[in-house]
Image (cartoon, rainbow, N blue to C red):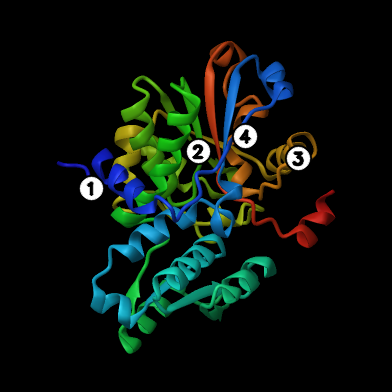
Amino acid sequence: MPLPVTYADVAAAARLLEGQALRTPVATSRTIDERTGARVFFKCENLQRAGAFKFRGAYNALANLTRAQQRAGVVAYSSGNHAQAVALAGRLLGVKAVIVMPADAPAVKVDATRGYGAEVALYDRERDDREAISNELARSRGLTPVPPFDDRYIVAGQGTAAKELVEDAGPLDYLLVPCGGGGLLSGCSIAARELSPGVKCIGVEPAAGDDVTRSFQTKTIQRVHNPDTIADGARTSAPGVITFPLILHHVHAMLTVTDDELLHTMFFIWERMKLIVEPTGALGAAALLEGKLGADEIKGKRIGVIFSGGNADVKALARYL
């Protein structure tokens, strides 16, 4: 069967995002190169507008709505980064946004979402169904849903991060990508394999939320309910019907890291690279620095790593120091 998103879609998204999304820098670290024996290139989506890669997909999705849909407004559910991205894209495009967020979402993300002009509807993560709430808002108020990852325009927009990385850093042997529902992973794997043939794209999840890893291994969609992990951006329950076939087709492997490994890596990045990366954003780096890839396997290789977001709730994370 034809795949739901192709490189042509990523290229179209890149043209639409030009002048809207930031072309984020690619950072390097001699310390990390020496530690890994590889040449590592970090795509700093923590420096993207709204603080995460999510702006790419959100803007692409809203810009591709019909005029009638844009006038009516949109609704989205998110723990934070997708919320902020849809809110900001809506403000730029003149589209009213209603965002359904868990009451325990990081305060910095809730405040930023409201700051971008969106209406925020809070729900109880343990008791309520966010998709049901979003669907009811869409039905009652005529809003268009904007999924966090399972949408072809979202996937294509996210893929522009890897497109820029390969264009700026050159061909890669490996690409490590944080994974929640698979929007970033599937989009980046499409772009990377087109522009750097032979690259091995690897998704990285928190060990407590390994639904995509288990789905990849079994070739059937597996689920996890409300995973308890510091990586709040990867608390998805399952890969999507759009992202899953793309992951099966383009991704080489899936890896997981524990919360302790993730926090250790995140603070190392803060201290040594002087870059604020949130826990979810450090997933790919954690897999690399915690040795999830064999030392002999990566020695002398060119490795791309996506820093997917920088919206760290510093007050909440301070207790882990």
**Residue that extends furthest to the left in the rendered view of this protein:** 1
Query: How far, Cα to Cα, is label 1 from label 4?
Result: 29 Å
Q: Pointer 3 and pointer 4: residues touching (CB < 8 Å)?
A: no
x and y, in percent, of residue 115 in the image: 60, 75
User: Which quadrant holds the N terminus?
Assistant: top left
In the drawing, does residue 202 fall left or right of residue 241? right
Judging from the image, what secondary structure is the residue with disc 4 in?
Answer: helix
Query: How far, Cα to Cα, is label 2 from label 3?
Result: 20 Å
Give the residue number, with chain letter if any, for mark 1.
4
| In the depicted structure, whether residue 148 falls above or below residue 76 | above
Q: Nearer the viewer, residue 121 or 31?
A: 31
x and y, in percent, of residue 292 in the image: 60, 26
Give the residue number, with chain letter if any, for mark 4.
285
In the drawing, does residue 32 fall left or right of residue 125? right
x and y, in percent, of residue 244 in the image: 33, 46
Give the residue number, with chain letter if any, for mark 2.
177
Q: Label 3 is placed on what type of residue?
A: Lys
Give the residue number, with chain letter if any, for mark 3.
274
Mark 4: few/some/many CA within 10 Å (<14, 14-19, 20+): many
